[in-house]
Image (cartoon, grey):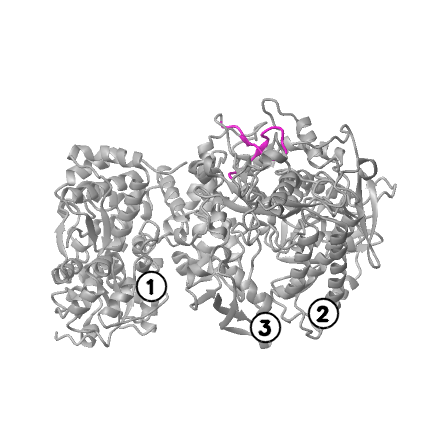
Amino acid sequence: MRAKLRVKRFSTEGEASTNAFQEYEVDVPEHFTVLDSLIRVREDVDPSLALRCSCRASICGSCAMRVNDRARLACKTRLTSVAKEGEIVTIEPMGNQRVVKDLVVDLQLFWGKVRAVEPFLLPDGPEPEEEYIAPNEAMLNLLTPMGCIMCGACVSDCTSLEVDKNFLGPAALAKSYRFVADPRDGAQATRLQNLNESGGVWDCTRCNMCVEVCPKGVAPMERIMELREGVMDQGMTNTPGARHVASFANSVARAGWLDETMLAVDSWGKFNLPKLIAEIPLAIRVLRRGKMPLPGPLHHKLKGADAIGRIFKRLEGKHARKF
Amino acid sequence: MADHDVLVVGAGLAGMRAAIAAHRAGANVAMMSKVHPVRSHSNAAQGGINAALRGTDDSVDSHIYDTVKGSDYLGDQDAIELMCNEAPGEIINLEHMGVIFNRDEEGRLGTRAFGGASYARTFFVADITGQAILHVMYEQILKSGVRSYEEWFATDLIIEDNQVRGVVAMEMLTGKLHTITAKSVILATGGVGRAFEPSTNALICTGDGMALAYRAGATLLDMEMVQYHPTTLAGNGVLLTEAARGEGAYLINSKGERFMEKYAPKMKELASRDVVSRSEATEIEEGRGVNGCVLLDLRHLGEKLILTKLKYIHEVAYDFAGVDMVKEPVPIRPGQHYIMGGIKTDVATRCWDETGAGRWTGPKGLFAAGETACVSVHGGNRLGANSLLETVVFGKIAGEAATEYAKGIGDFSVSGAWQSDREAAIKAVMDRPANGERTAALRLELGQTMNQHLAVFRNEEGMQTALAKVKELRARYASLPIVHKGSVYNTDLIFHTELGYMLEVAETICAGGLLRKESRGAHFRKDMPERDDENWMKHTTAVRGEDGPTMDTLEVVKTRWEPQKRVY
Amino acid sequence: MKYAFYPGCVSRGGTPELYTSTLAIAGKLGIELEEIVGAACTGAGVLQEKGQKLGDTLNARTFAMAERMGLTTILNICSTCQGVMAQANKRLLDDPDYLAEVNEELKPEGLEYTGRVIIKHLAWVIVEEVGLDTLKGLVKNPLADLKVAPFYGCYILRPSDALGFGDNPGRENYLERIIETCSAEPVNFPGRTKCCGFPIMLINERNSMAMVGNHTTSAKEHGADCMVTPCPLCHLNLDGQQPKAQAQRGAKIGMPVLHLPQLVGLAMGLSPKDLGMNQHVVSTKGVEAKASVRV
């Protein structure tokens, strides 16, 4: 088949300096991946095209790039899965990171975040003579985050990182989970305290982008949600994030549905007068348009509220987290 | 003052294990790798790592015996004994570092069966054991604070007065050359699979360390011993782990027969790799293949086992062959996978003969570990799950030995000519006029040639043809131009240099094959199908000469095991 | 066709105009809505942090109520409700033991979920069941001059496997197709599949407002007259908080944001008032003018 690739080129070197798309066409077999096709371009057409790749088998994590607007491993993406015969495939470097040349990005931001979570086992006390005794279920649970190949796809497309480079981001948080959930690690409490800080677990927007783009099924966001449970279970409940969860649960437990107004007040903090005063203009704005639901005791109960409350009593706090 | 006491070139498992050992021994150690450490090819080891840790009947002696037998009696028995004795301690060490090994019901380390092994002694993390260990090793590197030159490409070993002094290397993100001095250098750069096409190896496996050492006067050992793995995917040559067979998968031919019953009545699919690969090749040659392949059948293992213990290869077979292994058998064939040969070292990973007996040559202060080295623990055929073991055992030894060695080296300075000569050489290549030749095309010719004539079955004529072809390619390489002239991340220049490395190494593979007048392990000559213990309990050696390698032999070290007929 | 209608919390709270406009177009499209009375909040992903089984049980209860009503399809008008329900349903269907456990919790109310409910967002119902041809026939007021930037909201797109994109890959651009059917012009812009910032509005306001500012501005820069969203939570942030995002950004934005049924309603010739457009924070006058609607 004819592969038509529209590749974002970038160079700052003298005459070759560029920052534009370039189109390539090469004949390739039907089974070719995006990576195979790019290698064909590099070998036969344009050796100046820079990209990282190595294993060709989705295990080394080198070839993450944006293919048709989404971060993917080029080696794991069949050409036919992203374009029909004759269609153009758009290939760009990963997002949220500085481009060095063409499809090669500077991974300093990525590794800086990984380093920030103390990414190594911190055992409690001296090592045992033999191996640590640990249940196989705990090891199998860790297989998911250990499956991370540090390709950077999640960091590339993270919608929170896009607006805040202070956020630890999905890969580093999944890496942190790998230790928090490791029964051999002795620093769980400290780790969770650190993750409760600004830039930690509460800055994830739960947009599912990392779950969608991760080529290895690590589902970083789900790990972040488990970490949130862990943080709250450690008693760290006086943050906007934890109060947000508590308020949400309280209103649904009481009335069966969400009390939006109380959710705001509780999250900001009931006694956070400066914030409450600052929000008066917003309150007036929405009140005027008939859009401010009645809060607290005035928030009416659904017909089935009692049954819903019963379910809460039985199941609230029964976490799915696996550590 | 040297920049470092110890410089490790290559940051896969052997390299990182060496760096950690050197760091723990108090050295100022740095690692250098042309890729980020977690991109290293150790990732691709899937099935596990061997050790006779404990078990009902297993013993270290049994592990040693299986390895000696697996090597077809070509492995040095002192080195094999050392490796197998160190294995249990290293497994525990890896576990303490944080590797999430599979457990048994009591929460202790659990094992699986593997090829050529008398007992189930393979410790594993699903089918991503290499990746799981590599990433944990990198965690330990981050913990240690060891300096890491990432995406630095070594172009020269600096040798003055037969003494290693460091390397010249290119920082790939800028294209700048640097001289990094060190009192000792450990090469841990992996194999040379890209000299074959197809291969299970990553694109980075281009024999860099072997070529650097060879050019620096070191000896290459048993280079003809190239392993073809029995289960690689047709098409792109990607590996499907031996653990599939360890867990009970069958190999079947076009008639639906489990043909290994015929070739290895006792061990069947779990015979050693050279035996299984030859059997498959025979089935295919004799017309019982399916489109040049045989079939790997996992269906009877059930979905649950496949999706937990063999999850990654399930994904690989689906992504790259479009086969759901839960429902269908997957077509596979033998494919180039590993090289048992490499830079000759002693059991302390030294590349020179410390005894002063001059049994082989090599510069002082140079060490090697992992696939790039040949200690030799694999001899004519490596057992599955012994390669990860080799990397950590000899990586650790290398780190400690290089640290100790560095203590005896005083201050020195090196000539600036090393770097300026390399700069001039690169400029000369850059200035070559375009002549229509492309690096990729030459590399492909090399790979196809090697895969045709130095594969599972070999003979004199084929190997002569291959050698002549390699010599021809070397001649063409001498005027091979570079198209891209930039400095930043110029992979055209890197590939060009790597091709130079591969051509030199490939020449020693051909020469070794021609020298060895027998069949042993992976080296099976149809024109000389018998093993010849009388004349060939010997390693082949290759030393760089004016016009290709100078070949010789070296006695195999025997301790307790006399050669026997190999039956599985 | 008749649907078990799940309006969600926000269409009865912060964005009542979504509820109004949905009812205003449903009848014309042949969509009969019977509200699931007493159905709990889906949890919006937040309750799930208090326990996944809690969230899944509340959703299973809703599914069981729909089944008891004798209806096969639940119709959502919120991307978030759609996504959360779809994920809960997948977990329940993937593991029969889990479903049985959850059903135990529903017994006191005499409810049982048998696993046969189909869950669809209004946008999917319009494309897959009403049909764009039918919609085309109902367009009395083609929005020919209008450039519309579709903003999907995360949970109607991700995770795509739970949302059935395998069988319905077209779901990733239904909004564009509906916009085109209304004779308007879809505007491609970088924010279309990103997060609006609502889930962290009360947790990290600065980040949330940066997202609102980025998406509304980039829609504007790409030439959009308005945005359209199938998610009321996105609307709360993109419209309701736009003044705040403007202040943080220090630049005027003024990007009107329509609910999906408002856009469809305008094309059908309904009046902006009947569609509740007077309840928006960012004025929709410009849109109404371009849509040649007599105000």
Q: Chain of mark 1?
A: C
Q: Say what secondary structure mark 3 lies in.
A: loop
Circle nearer the viewer, 3 or 2 = 2
Q: Nearer the viewer, residue C244 or C180?
A: C180
Calculate the distance from the C-alpha at mark 2 to the C-alpha at mark 1. Answer: 48 Å
Q: Position of residue B165 (x, y in %)?
A: 77, 53
Quadrant of the image containing the C terminus of chain C: bottom left
What residue range appears in magenta?
B107-126
- The circle drawn on residue B429 is 2
Quadrant of the image containing the N terminus of chain C: bottom left
Quarter of the figure with residue C31 = bottom left
Asked if badges 3 and 2 are on one and the same chain, I answer no
Tell me the residue that label 3 is attached to.
A13
Q: Residue at x 12, y 67 (%)?
A: C273
Q: Is residue B321 left or right of residue C219?
A: right
Q: Is residue B122 magenta?
A: yes
